[in-house]
Image (cartoon, rainbow, N blue to C red):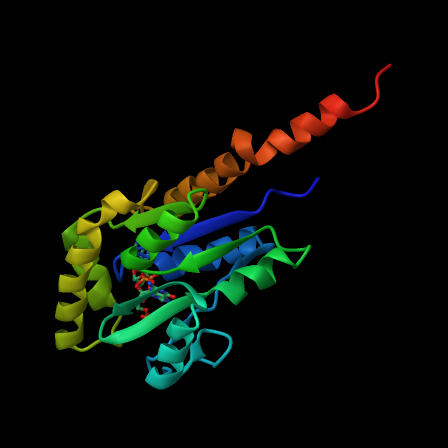
Amino acid sequence: MSDPFLLLILSSPSGAGKTTLTRKLREKFPTLRFSISHTTRKPRANEADGKDYHFIDRTQFDELVEREAFLEWAHVHENCYGTSLAEIERAKSDPSCSGIIFDIDYQGARQIRAKVPEAVSVFILPPSMVELERRLRGRASESEDAVRKRFAAARVEIEHYGFFDYLVVNDDVDSAFRHLEGVILAERSRRFRRAELAERLLRAGTL
Ligand code: ADP
Ligand code: 5GP
């Protein structure tokens, strides 16, 4: 019995632990595919085109907007990011794929929810602002200025928690992951996602 198809939006302020939790999600749910966004941001040293993002320039991005190729798009940290409709079609046409996870910001979450009401959205919260700052500083790769900017941006992200269906607190990683897993399992059992099976059973042969 295959799992019903899920559109899962996962957002968080930077440093709350989204990368850590999505790594675990990939291991536990290999049939969930991660959406690869388009962005005008330049690739970082460890990023590959077509794997982490589709890296394009502003003219190409504007053309895609013009052609209405995006399900959602937004300006985030001075760059443009968007989820193409083709990305979802590819996932839906793959029989081994049971859903797609979008790592997008609150603006994208708001747009997808408005267009696809059955999409499920989860916002990951840090247990406290002190701990968020500690985690941001713990990533030694960032300069003091970058940490300050990310911390200020994190406040703005958290202000928009109301756009999300679920809030998962990442205090202890294993506990946060169990909650995330619980959301996915519960959403797969929603009546509207299983009604077709119930109806098929009713139409099936009698004794
Ligand atoms: P994000 O992708 O949201 O920016 P990361 O997953 O990179 O966040 O996590 C930020 C930092 O916090 C990393 O150093 C990570 O190891 C650490 N971290 C993540 N979750 C926890 C947790 N529950 N407890 C303690 N440290 C954590
Ligand atoms: P980064 O540049 O660090 O990879 O991502 C910066 C922010 O952009 C993150 O909050 C990430 O969730 C968001 N983001 C990535 N792709 C998309 C997208 O396609 N649409 C939107 N709205 N946000 C995105």
Question: Which quadrant of the figure shows ligand 2?
Answer: bottom left
Is residue 57 something that shows in the picture?
A: no
Q: Residue furthest top?
A: 207
Work out whether 108 lies above or below 206: below
Q: Is residue 172 visible?
A: yes
Left-right relation of 4 to 129: right
Of residues 183 and 36, the one drawn nearer to the viewer in this rendering: 36
x, y percent for residue 174: 41, 46
Q: Quadrant of residue 108?
A: bottom left
Rendered residue at 46%/38% (across/down): 182
Q: Position of residue 45 (x, y in %)?
A: 38, 84
Q: Position of residue 128 (x, y in %)?
A: 18, 48
Quarter assignment of residue 146 = bottom left
Q: Which residue ends up furthest to the right in the rendered image?
A: 207
Residue at 36% over, 82% down: 44
Q: Position of residue 14 (x, y in %)?
A: 26, 62
The N terminus sits in image quarter: top right
> In the figure, is residue 204 to the left or right of 124?
right
Residue under the point 38% across and 82% down: 43
Q: Is residue 18 above or below residue 183?
A: below
Q: Nearer the viewer, residue 166 or 140?
A: 166
